[in-house]
Image: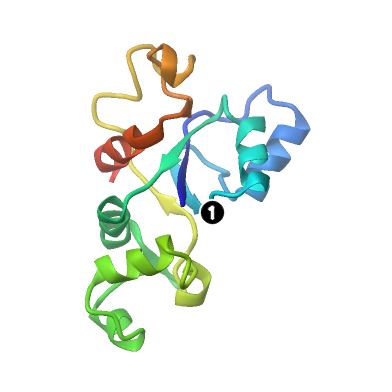
């Protein structure tokens, strides 16, 4: 599974790029979603790569995001009652279910978009204007996405 974080706004972006961001449910800066690692999703990510950063998320980081930023419908946090109704021991187990695609966030009743804080110490040396490989913030971060998400949650 891939974690995708929007890092730039949509001023002066073409309509098709805005439409792709809407399909990804990334309509605001610092919002995060989790996607399956499929060719269709990779095509959408390549189209909007200058507006986002992404990479494979690990279970520990995702359980931290669920704990701090996970919301049920009605903006209720994930609590002991949620764990009891889904027969889970803790949020680590729920994160494993989602990342192994046994259950989806929709099946669990969790909102698919996580609202994060801006990252402590920024996105990179040159901000969001250049790619991650050149010291910036956008594009594929590979395993480093987990460090960014921890700084944002």
Does residue 54 sit above or below 63 in this rendering? above
Q: Nearer the viewer, residue 99 or 29?
A: 99
Q: Is 6 left or right of 49, judged from the image as shown?
A: left
Does residue 49 appear in this view? yes
Q: Is 16 left or right of 76, judged from the image as shown?
A: right
Does residue 8 sit above or below 21 in this rendering? above
Query: Residue sitting at 27 percent across and 36 percent down?
Result: 147
Query: Residue sitting at 43 percent across and 20 percent down?
Result: 132
Query: Residue sitting at 61 percent across and 40 percent down?
Result: 42
Instruction: Give the image location of residue 99, x and y in percent.
Output: 41, 60
Q: Label 1 belongs to which residue?
A: 36
Does residue 68 sit above or below 3 in this rendering? below
Q: Please, what secondary structure does the residue beneath circle 1 have?
A: loop
Category of crowding for the residue at label 1, using alpha-carbon neighbours closer than 10 angstroms: few (below 14), some (14–19), many (at least 20): some
Q: How is the image coloured?
A: rainbow
Instruction: Give the image location of residue 94, x and y in percent.
Output: 33, 70
Instruction: Give the image location of residue 29, x and y in percent.
Output: 48, 37
Q: Residue furthest right?
A: 15
Does residue 30 appear in this view? no
Query: Residue sitting at 44 percent across and 72 percent down?
Result: 74
């Amino acid at each position: 599974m891939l974690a995708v974080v929007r890092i730039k706004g949509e001023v002066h972006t073409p309509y098709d790029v805005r439409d792709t961001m809407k399909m990804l449910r990334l309509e605001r800066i610092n919002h995060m979603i989790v996607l399956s690692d499929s060719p269709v999703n990779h095509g959408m990510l390549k189209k909007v790569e200058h507006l986002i950063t992404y990479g494979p998320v690990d279970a520990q980081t995702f359980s931290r995001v669920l704990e701090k930023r996970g919301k049920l419908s009605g903006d209720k946090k994930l609590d002991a009652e949620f764990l009891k109704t889904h027969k889970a021991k803790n949020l680590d187990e729920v994160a494993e279910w989602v990342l192994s695609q046994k259950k989806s966030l929709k099946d669990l009743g969790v909102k698919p978009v996580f609202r994060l804080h801006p990252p402590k110490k920024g996105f990179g040396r040159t901000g969001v204007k250049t790619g991650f490989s050149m010291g910036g913030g956008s594009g594929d971060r590979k395993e480093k996405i987990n460090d960014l998400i921890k700084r944002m949650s």
